[in-house]
Amino acid sequence: MSGRARLALSAYAATLLAAGALIPLVEGVGWLVQAAVLLGVQSGVGALARRVPLARTLTIAAQAVVTLVLLTLVFARSHALLGVLPGPQAVMRLGELLVAGGEDVGTYSTPAPLTDGIKLMVVGGVILIGLAVDAMAVTFRSAAPAGLPLLALYSVAAGLSDGGAGWLWFLLAASGYLLLLLAEGRDRLSQWGRVFGGAARNTGGLADGLSGVSGGPSPVRTGRRIGVLALGIALVAPLALPALDSGLLGGSGPGNGRGSGGGTISAVNPLVSLQNNLNQPENREVMTYRSNIEDPQSLYLRILALDEFNGSEWRSSTRRLTDLPDRLPQPAGLGGDVSVTEVRTNISASRSYQQTYLPLPYPASEVRVGGRWRYEPEGRTLVGDDGQTTRGARYEVGSLVVEPTAEQLASAGAPPEELLREYTQVPGSLPGVVAETAERVTEGSANAYERAVKLQDWFASEGGFTYDTTVTSGTGSSAIARFLRDKEGFCVHFSFSMAAMARTLGIPARVAVGFTPGTMKSDGAISVGLRDAHAWPELYFEGVGWTRFEPTPSRGSTPSWTRPEVPTDSASEAAEPSTGTSAAPSAVPSAEDSCPPQLRQEGGCGPSPEPGAALPTDRGTPAGTVLLVMLVAVLVLVLPLSPLLWRNRTRSSRLGSGGRTPADAAAQTLAAWREITDTAWDHGIAPDESLTPRKAAARIVRLGRLDTTAAEAVHRVASSVEQVLYAPEPRPAPGLAEDASAVRAGLRASTGRGTRLRATLLPRSSVRVVWALADRRTALAERWAGRPGAGRWTARLRRLTRQHG
């Protein structure tokens, strides 16, 4: 191995060892594996560029470009050109995710959950440090200054950590730096030969160079001194950094949140963690409850209301808190002629769920809870006082089930002037397209109720919107305008856009944040998980009060007062009973989307004069060579991963939201079945088109050796397929995405490591791409053959071929 290759390998190892100091700050270590792979590709590009050879600046530029491509591929491929190249939208996406990551950092305490933003920050930070270390130590052959970025990486991690095995991370970082210095010493000695300063006291290569001699310092001695100084600073610097308790970087996190349950939702804006919760790979339980309500699908657990829109964000107004009364006052605006039923709900929060606001059914009339809780009358919310959180809380809530009729809402009188003025304010920065769209959608409406219903239906089913939890969760004016243009987003975008449009129409509106009802368990309790996090608009009608609407497709349940026709004409799959093995109806199904990411990477270098042996001259390199190297690097990365990328994109498309109409639900059922059969194919169970869905399901269960949960999921989807194909009135079941995911998990659990690796990296079902291309080619050939004069052009082409052949 050459000296420069050894130096590059040492720089790579030193960066990874120093990155180990970040492990205590976030949950899991998967990010470090990903960073190691990306860093290895970056280092390989640098080695290739130096071997060409390219000028030093061009070498660093090539590494920076490839690094940006890598980050785009991992964190923003859905916004990239051709799924890989970092175009303007991809760069904007990385920047937006950087902002989201900064908000996450200010929200969570260590160890913080690995949100997309935090993951991009730690992975991107390690790669940036690696680029700086590689540039200094390898490209410019000056390893001693390369300890500064390593020092920065360790010092930040040590300052944010609250103790533990900090000495271990320091030893690892120090060992990496010393390894880098040693590699540089060997590289320089191999160029200089034996270093003399008088009579040699030892014979033998490296020992001579590392031992001091009288006549002048060894070229390595200066590097060793700088290394010792840097290590001393690394020991002292963390002592000067204060321990930060309220969030990963302080910020606005309201509590300490030290559990493993995903940190603390900010008291100022809980939307930071909402998107992360929706994209969790596992729907971790945050609370369970039992209630005597007749329809548990309508029991939303509300955390707080965001009622102030300043143009850059929606947030909760600062309001006066009071002591918690024994009986909460009558809800504002609720008249005596509206049907009201009081129900009781017993809630038990998980010890891993720490949050400052207490989730309550709305409107609560009585709350029995221990601890220090304060009451905010306007939003009817309970706020923890003096560090009080929901961790392990058990409480009983009495709440009102308000069931207005469409006629009561349509005949609602004018709201109080003060309330109207406060809750219809919109910022001057709100683009005119928002109000124009609201007027167009609600044209012909006779009253505020009809306008509200038209807005809800437009978002939920008629406007062509797509539910996607990977879209950046901006809530400002520009985010609303972008959402109305692109028509892609999740509950945050739907709820805030509808609330803003309602305000432009003169309807008082705010946004509630909390959880959808959850899923019924076998023991009768209802489980609420992270992926049940939700946001929905509340509109005010005099005589009824603040009233829930549901514009988000595939999430929650459509309120009965927004369905003027009989329930069977409604296409809300959330209101359909489950056709699974349990007789108890399933509450709201969790959305299954993956997920989501957000940052921008730039290369950095530090020029350093290089003493010693001559290096390649910094001659200019043709731009074609640089482009060729970049193209080769991209191809090396993309081609092996193309089956994986296609399969993930196909799975996300099949299991995404399909709308609320019966046709959409039927298409979504067939797509979920195709996803299950392809997943089985990927794991070695070839599809048999001759079998009925029921027999095909039994075959998958038998050959895949599925457990009970996965087997029941296969049969549920097969039953839904039979309903869609053969029933006079199909009733596709909800939860198809969850069932498909359960089947995939069951197949992975019952197969060996080699099969799982093959199914992930080289899925058999990716041959469908080849089939699709072949079908398209055949269709084009048939279309060409059917055109007038096609035979004459074909004969002429054949003659030309013979003449030149």
Image (tube, rainbow, N blue to C red):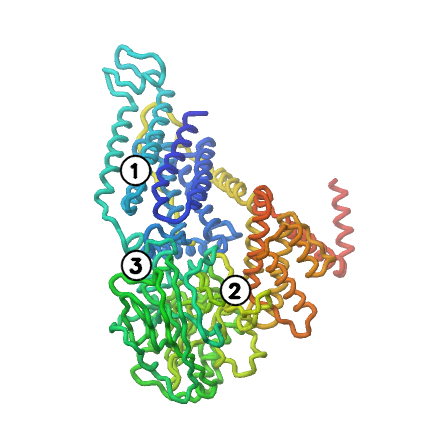
Mark 3 residue crowding within 10 angstroms, few (<14) / some (14–19) / many (20+): many
Picture coordinates of residue 774, whole percent (x, y): 69, 52
Which residue is at the front of the view, 693 or 85? 693
Q: Earlier in the sequence, mark 1 or mark 2?
A: 1
SS category of the residue bearing label 3: loop
Picture coordinates of residue 610, whole percent (x, y): 32, 28
Which residue is at the front of the view, 631 or 156? 156
Q: Nearer the viewer, mark 1 or mark 2?
A: 2
Which residue is at the front of the view, 143 or 761? 761
Q: Is residue 237 visible?
A: yes
Q: Earlier in the sequence, mark 3 or mark 1?
A: 1
- Residue with the most extreme left position: 240
The residue that disc 2 covers is 522
Which residue is at the front of the view, 329 or 118? 329
Q: Nearer the viewer, mark 3 or mark 2?
A: 2
**Is 694 left or right of 745, judged from the image as shown?**
right
Q: Tell me the tag on residue 167.
A: 1
Say which quarter of the image contains residue 475.
bottom left
Residues at marks 3 and 1 touching, judged by CB atoms closer than 8 Å: no
Mark 1 residue crowding within 10 angstroms, few (<14) / some (14–19) / many (20+): few
Q: Tell me the tag on residue 253.
A: 3
Q: Gap in Å between the C-alphas at discs 1 and 2?
A: 48 Å
